[in-house]
Amino acid sequence: MNRRKIGTEYENLAARYLESKGLRILESNFRCRLGEIDLIAKDHSVIVFFEVKYRSSEAMGVPQEAVDHRKQTRICKVADYYRMTHHLGEFTPFRFDVISICDHHMIWIPNAFPYQSRK
């Protein structure tokens, strides 16, 4: 199985998990020229941008460690684009969460990192 297919499989698993927790999935694999966000959901009135990371084992570290500062900055830029194109005002609350999956064990990390502004 190729990496993209594996990624899609685990993103779908994460989406089903989040729906079971009461979130509404708005987008999967939102792409623009700036990058991609795996899942975008609504948690009550909060827009949540999710990065889903999968590892088959912890030999290379836990999955959430792969969401480094550079990746966070890219996700924030894509989130800015999403918010602009969907006419979400500056007062619409949002956050960045990570879903970490390792050997079929899933961890949801709310507020995994802060917004990285475009300075």
Image (cartoon, rainbow, N blue to C red):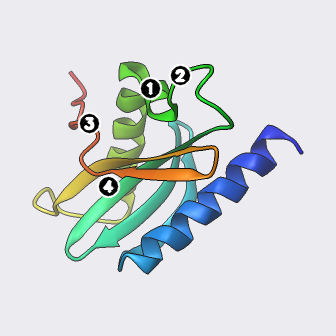
| Mark 3–mark 4 distance (CA, rounded to whole Å) | 21 Å
x and y, in percent, of residue 95 in the image: 24, 51
From the viewer's perspective, tell me whether residue 25 is left or right of residue 59: left
Q: Mark 1 and mark 4 in contact (Cβ < 8 Å)?
A: no
> Mark 4 or mark 2: which is in front?
2
User: Please, what is the three-letter code of the amino acid marked with disc 3?
Assistant: Phe
> Mark 2 or mark 1: which is in front?
2
| Mark 3–mark 1 distance (CA, rounded to whole Å) | 12 Å
| Above or below for 34 versus 48 | above
**Of marks 4 and 1, which one's residue comes earlier in the chain?**
1
| Mark 2–mark 1 distance (CA, rounded to whole Å) | 7 Å
> Mark 3 or mark 2: which is in front?
2
- Residue displayed at 69% across by 37% down: 56
Q: Mark 1 and mark 2 in contact (Cβ < 8 Å)?
A: yes
| Mark 3–mark 2 distance (CA, rounded to whole Å) | 18 Å
77 or 115, nearer to the observer = 115
- Residue displayed at 86% across by 41% down: 2
Picture disc at residue 84: 4
**Of marks 4 and 2, which one's residue comes earlier in the chain?**
2
**Of marks 3 and 1, which one's residue comes earlier in the chain?**
1
- Label 3: which residue? 113
Q: Mark 2 and mark 3 in contact (Cβ < 8 Å)?
A: no
| Mark 4–mark 2 distance (CA, rounded to whole Å) | 35 Å
Picture disc at residue 65: 1
User: Please, what is the three-letter code of the amino acid marked with disc 2?
Assistant: Gly
**Of marks 3 and 2, which one's residue comes earlier in the chain?**
2
| Mark 4–mark 1 distance (CA, rounded to whole Å) | 29 Å
x and y, in percent, of residue 48 in the image: 32, 59
Count residues near mark 1 (Cα–Cα under 10 Å), then give few for <14, some for 14-19, many for 20+: few
Q: Secondary structure at mark 4?
A: helix
User: Please, what is the three-letter code of the amino acid marked with disc 4?
Assistant: Met
> Mark 3 or mark 1: which is in front?
1
